[in-house]
Image (tube, rainbow, N blue to C red):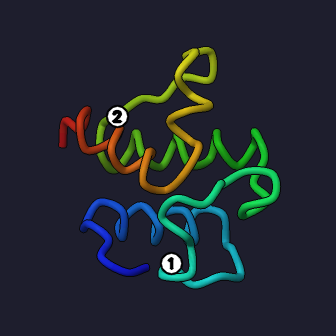
Amino acid sequence: MSRCSTMEHELAMLIVSALDLDVKPDEIPLDGPLFGDGLGLDSIDALEISLEIAKKYGVEIKAEDERSQQIFSSLRSLATFVGQHTTK
């Protein structure tokens, strides 16, 4: 991950750890898709990531939020959202 922010790096580590992925945090592309053809994540993975983000940052991402697809579209968009809404 070249030129990533601290938040992007922390979230990449959180994703790899929470989902026990066989990939290094710095191998997650900043603007690449997290779901489908990207990392291959699914809705259960999104729930796991959301729970970890809520615990660590106090940010809730609800499944029914119409923005959730955009929020989870990439590591960069997820980091932007969490950074804007963090309470911890």
The disc at residue 25 is 1
Which amino acid type is shown beneath numbered disc 1?
A: Pro
Q: Where is residue 87 in the image (x, y as percent from the top left)?
A: 19, 35
Q: Does 56 sit left or right of 36 as displayed?
A: left
Lower sequence index among marks 1 and 2: 1
Q: Where 56 falls versus 14 (above or below)? A: above
State the image quarter where residue 10 is shown.
bottom left
Tell me which residue sits at (50%, 36%) in the image: 71
Tell me which residue sits at (54%, 51%) in the image: 74
**Count of numbered circles on the image:** 2
- Callout 1 secondary element: helix
State the image quarter where residue 82 is shown.
top left
The CA distance from mark 1 to mark 2 is 21 Å
The disc at residue 59 is 2
Which amino acid type is shown beneath numbered disc 2?
A: Val
Q: How crowded is mark 2: few (under 14 residues within 10 Å), some or many (20 or more)?
A: many
Q: Where is residue 9 in the image (x, y as percent from the top left)?
A: 36, 70
